[in-house]
Amino acid sequence: MAHVLAADIGNTTARFGLLETAEAGAEGAPKLLSACEVTTRQPITTDEARMQLGQILSELTGKASSRGGACPSPEGSILSCVVPTLTDAWHRALADTVLGKQLVVGPGLRSGVKLRFNNPSEVGPDRIADAVAARAAYGAPVVVVDLGTTTNFEAIDASGAFCGGIIAPGVALGARSLAEAAARLPIIELRAPERVLGRSTREAMQSGVVLGEAARIDGLLDAMLAELADTGKSARARLGEGSAAHENERDEDDAGAATPMAIPIVITGENATAIAALLHHQTIIDDALTLRGLALIWQANQRG
């Protein structure tokens, strides 16, 4: 087994995980040994990132050791950073702190997932990690909802390709924007109110922000799942076009094809458990999805 430090630097928070992965050339799902989350500092120097990383590593190894004995130092690291101005500082800090290979998710790094985008270089590294981990754990097709500064939806089609997605303002960003743009509206606690019809300004805002976020996610999921199902039917129709001999086979395929209800929906990120409880769709809560995806990408790039 090999151990890797995964760093997921977001706009608001940064999450770090120590994971156990299979050796180069071997298969196997990464195991998260420990994780921690800190506020993203902007700007940050390489020295500041290195000092913070030292504390983070101490915390991670301490947590891992308390759960199962001695924890080896990581043999490499992988970085996902959605803030371009911070990437270099964190990359240098990781190179100074962690032995072995240091990887940064971006163009040129093998992920194993085909990106069906007009410009694949625009796809955020955290979204790629989500797609890699979701496909590995739940198969394809699969949909991911990642809650953070933005609410990201990722769609992986039946072939296993990352075929598109949605980016919307996150729930905390929505609440903050309301308070900043409207003089009489306060900062609110992000929790669901007891009733939809608020009897105070705060309750009304919680309905609009929190329940509104759940309704938006449900509505967008309906549209995404329907589009994925239609795309799958169209692809099967093209493959069988003009071949009457395969008519019965196509009918059987359609009967067993992935329907909107059959496609797994994975939710991760900030307040995932609370938001999932408000949704009409059944979801799988996976708090470690992005970190496992980073570890899988690191593992894939140890071969050859």
Image (tube, grey):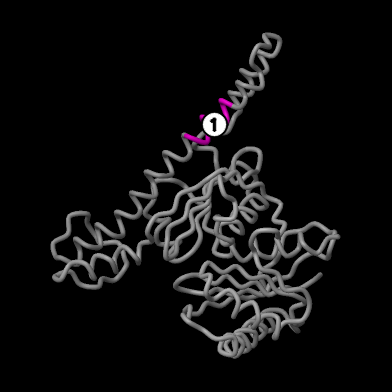
Q: Hey, which quadrant is residue 105 in on the image? A: bottom right
Q: Residue type at mark 1?
A: Thr
Q: Is residue 232 magenta?
A: yes
Instruction: Give x and y (percent) for residue 162.
Output: 60, 46
In the figure, 257 relative to 156: above or below? above
The picture places residue 187, in percent across and down from the top left corner, at 25, 73
Residue plotted at (28% across, 66% down) = 177
Looking at the rendered image, the quarter that the C terminus falls into is bottom right
Percent x, y for residue 207?
24, 58
Q: Residue at x 79, y 71 (%)?
A: 2
The majority secondary structure of the magenta stretch comes to: helix
* Residue 88 shown in magenta: no
| Residue 210 pos. (x, y %) | 31, 59
Q: Nearer the viewer, residue 105 or 239?
A: 105
Which corner quadrant of the image does residue 213 belong to? Answer: bottom left
Closer to the camera in the image, 298 or 272: 298
Residue drawn at 56 percent across, 89 percent down? 48
Q: Measured along the vertical axis of the image, is residue 56 above or below residue 82? A: below
Left or right: residue 188 compared with residue 23? left
Quick check: 230 above or below 301?
Answer: above
- Looking at the rendered image, the quarter that the N terminus falls into is bottom right
- Image label count: 1
Q: At 52% across and 48% down in the image, what residue appears?
A: 265
The residue that label 1 is drawn on is 231
| Span shown in magenta | 227-234
